């Protein structure tokens, strides 16, 4: 059976789109594209344009980057007609999305840095808004993604750059089909399959096209479900479960006065979903206000920031109840974000209640974030009693069922009791299957396994308080964390949280970690935050994590001991002082405002990887999202939704290196974990949610090793691979080895001795893999196109933060001190280490030169680093001069370009690069010269600057 050719796939898709209602149009060149654009815009706007008028429209359309163009698409353009009149030109009808002009074409050719021919293009009103890239069946889907990446670099932005109006990309190999929003920073990890309302994936191209590319649906996705993220200046498109959730809320409001809730697992993007639902509801003329309710001040601030990131003008936070009431009465503010506490105050205190009395019969829609936390209390009753025309919707990642409900007045308060029907659900198994969150790796550390007569499983039956607070127990765990933290976090490439049972225990752990750091046993950055009000370990079986807040401000005039525990307050002050010394900050906990400022700062430093371990009791275990956090140490009892919420701090998607969320439990939470998984997914979900154990991972690695051996049985045989197909197979095989090794590396017991592969063998194949990458990178700068261009080498799997220039300097100092007979061996080890580290390879020749010529002349090992800095400074100066001479550049301007790139992250434009030349080139050669010089500047930075501050 032969594989279906790409051309057949393309022809079938075009025919299918025509049958769906897209009109066929032949467009082969940019001139064809412009001619058709004029015709379609005239048709859509029911007018005609003279050539000068259309040129003005074209000039307007050509301005800006991808994000700017997305705004232009959605705005109307005021056209100055030739006769002096003004006309409002619409590029897409957002209110009646089916009332647009739909066309399909294929094989459009655009000339940029290279000539590129695109597969299938969907045009709406003449603008290319959907680009579909196809690969034949059997080809890795990621290659289609990488090909679009290449188009963006080589041709999308050239000439009139109309292909920068693409809103959604679709990639398919016939069997697998995914979509994603257009943006300047893209990752294959953020592509999505479409699915039906029950979360069943639709992967085949034909059924996908029937649903997703149907004219009305694709126009609705573009006009309603593509979000312009203002703070990141990027486009986002809702995933299918987000789409169905928003649609279900809109339908419920339109056709019923009943409430409802959305069950979407933690980490699945509930903020974006709730924002989009809120935003669309504000356009319903029957709704007076949409109120988004959170249950903590920091979440209020966070939600305001996130909502404003989606739409700067959409909302304004409410600083206090007075402001909330004012915004309730402001007709220009259809969307409010507030806390449950402020809302409760507004409808319970007489002075506020009287002011908003006029709104009590108006249609008000309330949307509650994490409704299980904020809705179990008297506030819910007050809201429904005061607002007679209310409608309530809740979002939760972990609903409250009868099994994990809290009893209030002998009544089990469940999510369904308060919000009635579940309108849409997307549980953790769905999210892991779709790769929207990561699996968990859960390990249990038995502190007492070597103690005769004591099994950790039975600790509950001993005097558990005495055991869990003993110095032996706490010291054992502290030592274990110090010994294994680098392994768990890939040498501090990620961060960790450590949750414990009480503030008293937290204090003991903090003191132990601090003392061991002062004794030189570790170099980890430790921080902590906790409430100093009493918070004994929760003894309920519900799994609810109590919220920790700073004591209410009205009590600030009371003696501190009246509302908190004085020793806890003193310790918090002491630890904040440690924090200030560590980071040069000036935080305190003298009142709620300063405490909140400290909390926000800690949150940001965890996200920025400036804190290695954050010690907490309950704080940050819910509602805190950090993609850089990959490990949770647990020394407390967790169960049901509290357990899932806490574990889920670790499983946000980031990159290839972050392959799972690590849970290291020092309590026997096995049964609790099983029960929580069964409650929030199903009893057979273990294999979906938790990664395979160490033994299974070793088996997978060994199977992958066998595949590698069938392609390249020795390291030297990589040199003999004849065709690009052979090289591609090797790259894919070794990439799989790297992926599996990345997972294995987080297991405490991992050693290459357990695999068929040896440590040195892995290092040698890594060098060959990087050689192949370098070869492809060099060839890609030429005009040739290779099948290897589209493969993602995932170099982040190779990069090790601990292997940097500073580390190499330490090895060179040891080399200098080594006996003559050992020097050759150590020198080879250093060179091999550099060759196998992706971030250092560009520096290899220069470091070898230093070892050969400079190192023998150094008499004192302590001077190795200083001598290397002097050497590097001179080499950098010479290389910059050579670059300037070779390319006839003004060195001062080159230095400015480099400094701008380092400071802003923005590479110089073509005009800026050309301006740095001593002599201005002809128009014919501008582009090729600019491309070459730009690459040389980037290579210079990679070699001489990147990594040198380590």
Image (cartoon, helix red, strand yellow):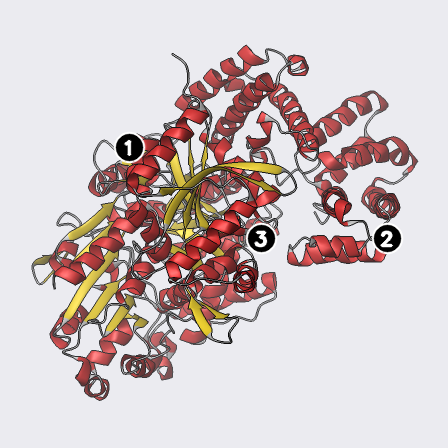
For label 3, the SS is loop
Visible residue check, residue 669? no
Tag 3: Cα neighbours inside 10 Å, few (<14), some, or many (≥20)? some
Instruction: Name the residue nearer the viewer: 734 or 789.
Output: 789
Residue 669 image point, x, y percent: 30, 40
Q: Which residue is mark 1?
A: 686
Distance from disc 2 to disc 3, alpha carbons, whole Å, reads 27 Å
Q: Is residue 639 left or right of residue 316?
A: left
Q: Which residue is mark 2?
A: 919
Residue 301 image point, x, y percent: 40, 68
Residue 298 drawn above or below residue 416: below
Tag 2: Cα neighbours inside 10 Å, few (<14), some, or many (≥20)? few
Quadrant in the picture for residue 131: top left
Quadrant in the picture for residue 550: bottom left
Closer to the camera: disc 1 or disc 2? 2
Q: Residue at x 30, y 82 (%)?
A: 330
Quadrant in the picture for residue 358: bottom left
Residue 484 drawn above or below residue 823: below
């Amino acid at each position: 059976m032969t594989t279906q050719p790409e051309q057949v796939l393309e022809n079938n898709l075009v025919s299918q789109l025509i049958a769906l209602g897209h009109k066929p149009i032949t467009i082969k060149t940019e001139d064809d594209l412009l001619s058709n654009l004029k015709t379609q815009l005239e048709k859509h706007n029911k007018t005609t344009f003279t050539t000068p008028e259309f040129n003005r429209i074209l000039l307007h359309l050509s301005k800006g980057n991808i994000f700017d163009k997305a705004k232009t698409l959605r705005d109307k353009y005021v056209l100055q007609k030739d006769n002096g009149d003004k006309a409002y030109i619409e590029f897409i009808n957002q209110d009646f999305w089916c009332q647009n002009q739909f066309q399909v074409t294929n094989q459009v050719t655009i000339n940029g840095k290279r000539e590129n021919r695109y597969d299938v293009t969907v045009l709406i009103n003449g603008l290319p808004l959907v680009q579909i890239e196809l690969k034949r069946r059997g080809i890795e889907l990621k290659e289609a993604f990488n090909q679009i990446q290449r188009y963006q670099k080589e041709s999308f932005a050239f000439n009139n750059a109309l292909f920068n109006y693409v809103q959604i990309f679709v990639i398919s190999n016939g069997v697998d089909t995914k979509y994603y929003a257009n943006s300047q920073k893209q990752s294959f990890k953020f592509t999505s399959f479409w699915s039906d309302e029950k979360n069943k994936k639709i992967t085949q191209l034909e059924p996908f096209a029937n649903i997703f590319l149907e004219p009305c649906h694709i126009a609705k996705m573009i006009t309603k479900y593509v979000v312009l993220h203002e703070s990141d200046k990027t486009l986002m498109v809702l995933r299918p479960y987000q789409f169905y959730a928003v649609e279900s809320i809109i339908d419920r409001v339109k056709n019923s006065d009943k409430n409802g809730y959305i069950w979407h697992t933690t980490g699945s993007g509930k903020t974006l979903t709730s924002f989009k639902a809120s935003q669309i509801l504000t356009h319903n003329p029957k709704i007076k206000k949409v109120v988004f309710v959170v249950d903590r001040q920091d979440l209020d601030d966070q939600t305001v920031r996130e909502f404003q990131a989606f739409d700067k003008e959409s909302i304004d936070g409410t600083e206090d109840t007075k402001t909330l009431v004012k915004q309730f009465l402001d007709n220009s503010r259809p969307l409010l974000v507030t806390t449950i506490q402020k809302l409760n105050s507004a409808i319970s205190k007489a002075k506020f209640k009287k002011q908003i009395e006029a709104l009590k019969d108006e249609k008000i829609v309330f949307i509650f974030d994490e409704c299980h936390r904020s809705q179990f209390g008297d506030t819910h009753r007050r809201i429904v009693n005061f607002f007679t025309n209310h409608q309530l919707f809740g979002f939760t990642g972990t609903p409250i069922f009868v099994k994990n409900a809290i009893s209030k007045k002998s009544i089990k308060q469940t999510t369904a009791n308060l919000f009635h029907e579940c309108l849409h659900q997307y549980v953790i198994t769905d999210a892991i299957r779709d790769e929207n969150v990561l699996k968990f790796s859960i390990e249990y550390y038995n502190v007492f396994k070597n103690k005769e007569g004591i099994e950790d499983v039975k600790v509950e039956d001993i005097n558990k308080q005495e055991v869990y607070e003993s110095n032996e127990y706490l010291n054992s765990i502290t030592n274990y964390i110090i010994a294994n933290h680098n392994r768990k976090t890939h040498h501090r490439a990620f961060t960790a949280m450590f949750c414990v049972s009480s503030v008293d225990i937290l204090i003991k752990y903090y003191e132990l970690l601090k003392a061991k750091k002062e004794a030189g046993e570790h170099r980890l950055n430790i921080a902590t935050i906790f409430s100093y009000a009493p918070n004994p370990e929760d003894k309920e079986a519900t799994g609810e994590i109590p919220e920790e807040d700073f004591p209410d401000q009205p009590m600030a005039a009371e003696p501190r001991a009246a509302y908190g525990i004085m020793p806890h307050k003193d310790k918090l002050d002491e630890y904040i002082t440690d924090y200030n010394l560590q980071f040069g900050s000036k935080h305190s906990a003298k009142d709620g405002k300063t405490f909140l400022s400290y909390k926000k700062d800690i949150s940001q430093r965890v996200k920025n990887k400036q804190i290695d371990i954050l010690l907490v009791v309950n704080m940050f275990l819910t509602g805190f999202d950090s993609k850089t956090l990959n490990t949770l140490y647990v020394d407390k009892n967790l169960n049901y939704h509290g357990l899932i919420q806490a574990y889920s701090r670790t499983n946000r998607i980031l990159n290839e290196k972050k392959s799972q969320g690590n849970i290291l439990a020092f309590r026997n939470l096995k049964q609790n974990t099983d029960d929580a998984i069964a409650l929030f997914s199903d009893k057979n979900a273990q294999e979906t949610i938790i990664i395979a154990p160490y033994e299974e991972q070793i088996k997978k690695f060994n199977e992958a090793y066998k595949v590698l051996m069938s392609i390249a049985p020795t390291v030297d045989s990589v040199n003999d691979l004849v065709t690009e197909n052979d090289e591609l197979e090797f790259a894919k095989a070794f990439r799989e080895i790297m992926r599996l090794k990345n997972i294995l590396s987080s297991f405490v017991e991992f050693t290459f001795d357990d695999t068929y592969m040896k440590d040195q063998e892995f290092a040698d194949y890594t060098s060959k893999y990087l050689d192949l990458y370098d070869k492809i990178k060099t060839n890609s700068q030429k005009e040739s196109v290779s099948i290897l261009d589209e493969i993602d080498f995932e170099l982040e799997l190779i990069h090790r933060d601990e292997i940097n220039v500073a580390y190499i300097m330490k090895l060179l100092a040891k080399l200098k001190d080594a006996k003559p007979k050992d020097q050759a061996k150590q020198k080879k080890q250093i060179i091999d280490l550099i060759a196998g580290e992706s971030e250092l390879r560009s520096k290899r020749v220069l470091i070898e030169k230093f070892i050969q010529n400079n190192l023998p002349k150094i008499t004192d090992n302590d001077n190795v680093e200083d001598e290397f800095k002097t050497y590097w400074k001179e080499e950098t100066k010479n290389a910059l001069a050579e670059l300037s001479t070779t390319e006839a550049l003004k060195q001062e301007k080159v230095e400015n370009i480099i400094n701008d790139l380092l400071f802003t992250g923005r590479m110089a434009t073509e005009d800026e690069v050309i301006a740095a030349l001593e002599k201005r080139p002809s128009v014919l050669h501008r582009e090729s010269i600019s491309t070459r010089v730009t690459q040389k500047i980037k290579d210079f930075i990679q070699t001489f600057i990147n990594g040198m501050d380590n």
